[in-house]
Amino acid sequence: MSDRIRHAFATRRPALVTYVMGGDPDLPESLELALACARGGADLIELGMPFSDPIADGPVIQRASERALKSGTTVAGCLELAAQLRRKLPSTPLALMGYLNPVLAMGMDPFLARCVEAGVDAVILPDLPVEEAGEFRALAAKRGVGLVFLIAPTSTPARVQAALDASTAFAYFVSVTGVTGARTALPEETAARLDSLRRPSGPPVVVGFGVSSAEQVRSLGAHADGVVVGSAIVSRIAEPGTGAEKAARVESFVRSLRSP
Amino acid sequence: MRFGPYGGQFVPETLMPALEELQAAYAAARADAGFQAELDALLKTFAGRPTPLTPAHRMTADCGGATVVLKREDLCHTGAHKINNTLGQALLARRMGKRRIIAETGAGQHGVATATACALFGLQCEVYMGALDVERQALNVFRMRLLGATVRPVEAGSRTLKDAMNEAIRDWVTNVRDTYYLIGSVAGPHPYPTMVRDFQSVIGREARAQCLQLAGKPPDAVVACVGGGSNAMGIFTEFIPDPSVRLYAVEAAGEGLETGRHGASLARGKPGVLHGSMSYVLQDAHGQIAEAHSISAGLDYPGVGPELSDLKDRGRLQLRQATDAEALEAFEYLARQEGIIPALESAHAVSQARKIAREMGSNSVLLVNVSGRGDKDIHQVMRR
């Protein structure tokens, strides 16, 4: 685990994890939007890498992916974005989240090498379950890039253990059986599931999918090391406005997620 | 389960337990003589199997080479080979206690076959279909609705089969506890490529025995069209162990391979991950999935089954392509020469079969899979 990640989870409980899509609506503006998240109080920044066929995402992030691809965003562009963000935010942990095929097209090891150069702390690939991740895990360990595996409400005890063991940065509990996107109500059993996932020797556990309000951040945050807000931020980016207006909107929304 | 480097289970974690459950349920069903007997009975009494093998006398004379024989999957109930698989999987879903079935469809044949199996077993059925395909296959949309299914048009992306499959996967991720995803091709995560192949391989088993009876020997070559590849794996599987039988996979060349507007994943794709498995995929240099193009909705898909990718790498397949224009020509050709109107998908196979038959000696036999009938395509052909 990188020092930045360790520090983020050690200092603020729960850590606030914010997601923006790299290249949405284009790379320079997405840089400003990620910086706005940081100003609003994000403790860890997730940058999405767009993919043509995002099967784990709901409509909001699908549209963001389409906008990013339309502006010509590639994995290489997202790595460059991460490098720029790293220069401006030396101590904020950065995670890249995307789908496997664009990473394969670059090559697993070249991708991981460029993650190191760019100062990326962790990688999340939702369509790469532990069973299929053998080579990627070995290469990431060698390069020192942290990995995040997902745990779902449907995961069996054996699968939960495998995901916790393989998660070298943090583990990501998917709060809902479904795709990404804001939900007004989250399953009641989420708190109990989260409590069962956090183990003394295990990785930090963040919870995400469906989280969109300060109330949810607070209630879930009592049972997790971090809370991820994604679609609720992305939908504010999709609304009309100038770059400066969008950044202000995102900053104030992220700040509101922390308000008592 | 891998086919060489291809296959696997590249899906969100939420679905992994469901795939484990499906794998176990299928393994148990496969070993259960009662399940097989029930499926065999349905294939015989409901689907109309065995389908005939028809000697194509006029086509044979016209080509002046191999004796051409046609495997008549167009005579299956619902008009294509798809019913072989949907009956098998619907039986499996019922055995697993799943009451809600979802499916993706391109040409609508798999959607109709799924809706039919669901009506037969009293299961709830929802079919995802690209909005473009909903337009060009209006007859099949009506048939699905008549059979009690809900058709959900998908407006995303290229509005074709690929996007329908994305949406079906998202539905499955959301409703995985009570929903069975009935995939129609030899694609998707394991165990689907194996399971769909097993259910379809009845085509090749029948065809080999019928060919022995009709021609006194097994075929020297077999031709099938390949989109995802279910009819091709269905007829090829029986012949794979016999290296003397050449296997021709005919992909959609669309407006021509050189235009980039085609569906030839095996010929022009690169290994990658789409819809849960590693296989040849049409994609750009950055790993974004390309849009496929074909006049035939069933071949309009940028991926292909992982076992076909492995067969290609092992040199077991002869790759051919047919353009939209060639498929249309073959559509009319088979109608006039043999009194059989093939599906536009199958017309791709017929188109190349004419050339292959000419290349073969007169004492050889060429087996062509007529995977479906062309009624669904008549409106589209008339409009051109």
Image: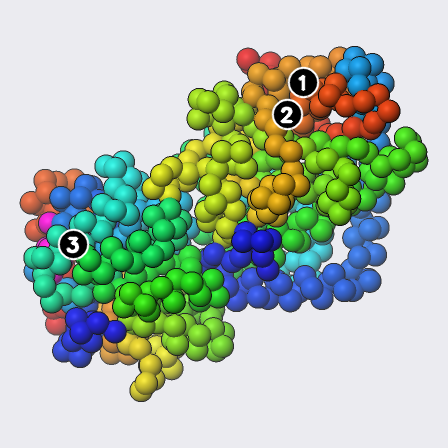
- Residue A142 appears in which quarter of the rendering? bottom left
Quarter of the image for the N terminus of chain B: give it.
Answer: bottom right
User: In percent of the image, x 45 and y 47: which residue is there?
Assistant: B272
Q: Which residue is mark 2?
A: B348
Query: Which of the marked residues, 2 or 1, is nearer the chain's N terminus?
Result: 1
Q: Could you say whether the residue bearing mark 2 is in a helix, strand or loop?
A: helix
What amino acid type is highlighted by mark number 3?
Answer: Ala
Q: Which residue is mark 3?
A: A83
Residue A9 on the magenta segment: no
Q: Of discs 3 and 2, which sits in the foreground?
A: 3
Quarter of the image for the C terminus of chain B: give it.
Answer: top right
Label 3, label 2: how many angstroms apart (C-alpha)? 49 Å
Disc sitting over residue B353 in the figure: none
Q: Residue furthest bottom?
A: A200
Of all chains, the one bearing label 3 is A
Label 2, label 1: how many angstroms apart (C-alpha)? 7 Å
Residue A33 on the magenta segment: yes
Task: Assign the magenta stretch its main secondary structure.
Answer: helix
User: In percent of the image, x 23 and y 49: which residue is there?
Assistant: A78
- Tell me: residue B261, above or below residue B3: above
Coordinates of residue A48 in the picture (x, y in percent)? 27, 53
Q: Could you say whether the residue bearing mark 3 is in a helix, strand or loop?
A: helix
- Tell me: residue B232, above or below residue A169: above
Start and end of the magenta stretch?
Answer: A32-38
Coordinates of residue B348 in the picture (x, y in percent)? 64, 25
What amino acid type is highlighted by mark number 1?
Answer: Ala
Q: Could you say whether the residue bearing mark 1 is in a helix, strand or loop?
A: helix
User: In percent of the image, x 61 and y 51: which residue is there?
Assistant: B193
